[in-house]
Image (cartoon, rainbow, N blue to C red):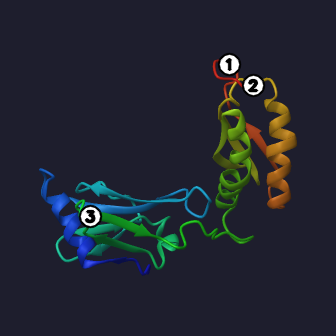
Amino acid sequence: MTAINITEAAQDYLLGLLKKQDKEGVGIRVFIENPGTPQAETCIAYCQPGEQQEGDRALALKDFTAWIDAVSEPFLEDALVDYAADRMGGQLTIKAPNAKVPMIDEDSPLSEQIHYYLQTEINPNLASHGGQVALIEVVEDGIAVLRFGGGCQGCGMVDMTLKDGVERTLKERIPQLKGVRDVTDHSNRENAYY
C-alpha cells in the first residue's frame, strides 16, 4: 500500500474546496500523468461519487475520501501533499519523489515497456517536428500497433521514421518485441511535417 501523506493542513484546505461543490460525497482523486517518465506530473482532481476508476484505492481521510489511481500508486510512494498559508493566502504543494522513476524491467508487461520508451525516448525526438506516436495495442505475439499524430500524420517520411526510428529503437530496448505496425490514416496531410 502506498505511503502517501496528505497533511492535516492539506486536508483542511481541500475540504474547503470540496465544500464549495454543490454535491454530497465529492472527494479527490490523486494520479500521475505519464508516470515513470521525465514528463510525469502529479495531479489532484475532484472526484464526484462514481467517478473513481476501476482499481482505485480509497484512502479514508478525516472528512472526505481520496481515491488513489491504481497505475500511479507505485509512483506515489513517499509522496507528500501539504498546504502552507502565506500572505497571499497559501499554496498546496505535491511532492512525489518517485513520479519520474521508471518502474519497468524486462519482466514488465510488453505494453508498459513500449509506452515507457515511447514517452521517454521516441516522442521527445518526434516533438521537434510537432509529432508524436502512441501505442494502441500489442497483438500477434509481440507486434506493437501504433498511431502517429501531429506532424507525423500524413508526413511523407513516416515510413522511414517508423522503421528506422521507432521500430529500431523499440526492438533494441525490448528484445521480445517482434515489430511495429502503423494504423494511422496518413491521407490527412493537414499538419504534416513533410
Instruction: Estimate how packed mark 2 is, as few (under 14), some (14 to 19) or many (20 or more) residues with alpha carbons within 10 Å.
Output: many
* Image position of 15 (left or right of 68): left
Residue at mark 1 to residue at mark 2: CA–CA distance: 7 Å
Q: Secondary structure at mark 3?
A: loop
Where 57 sits versus 190, above or below? below
Q: Which of disc 2 and disc 1 is earlier in sequence?
A: 2
Q: Percent from the top left, x then y, of residue 70?
A: 45, 66
Badge 2 amino acid: Cys
Q: In the rendered view, would you say 191 is above or below 72?
A: above
Q: Are discs 1 and 2 less than 8 Å apart at CB? A: yes
- Residue kind at label 1, given as amino acid type: Arg
Instruction: Name the disc covering residue 155, or none.
Output: 2
Q: Quadrant of residue 125?
A: top right
User: Is 18 located above or below residue 185 in the figure?
Assistant: below
Check disc 3 and give the amino acid type.
Gly
Mark 1 — residue? Answer: 189
Give the image location of residue 77, x and y in percent: 48, 77
Is 125 on the left-hand or right-hand side of 70?
A: right
Specify the quadrant that holds the N terminus.
bottom left
Q: Assign the C terminus to one quadrant of the image.
A: top right
For the point 29% across and 70% down, which residue is it?
Answer: 83
Q: Which of the two discs, 3 and 1, labels the residue nearer the N terminus?
A: 3
Q: Nearer the viewer, residue 180 or 65?
A: 65
Marks 3, 1: nearer the viewer? 3
The residue lying at 29 percent from left, 71 percent from top is 84
Percent across and percent down for residue 158 are 79, 31
Q: Which mark is residue 90?
A: 3
Which element type, helix, strand or loop, lies under badge 2?
Answer: loop
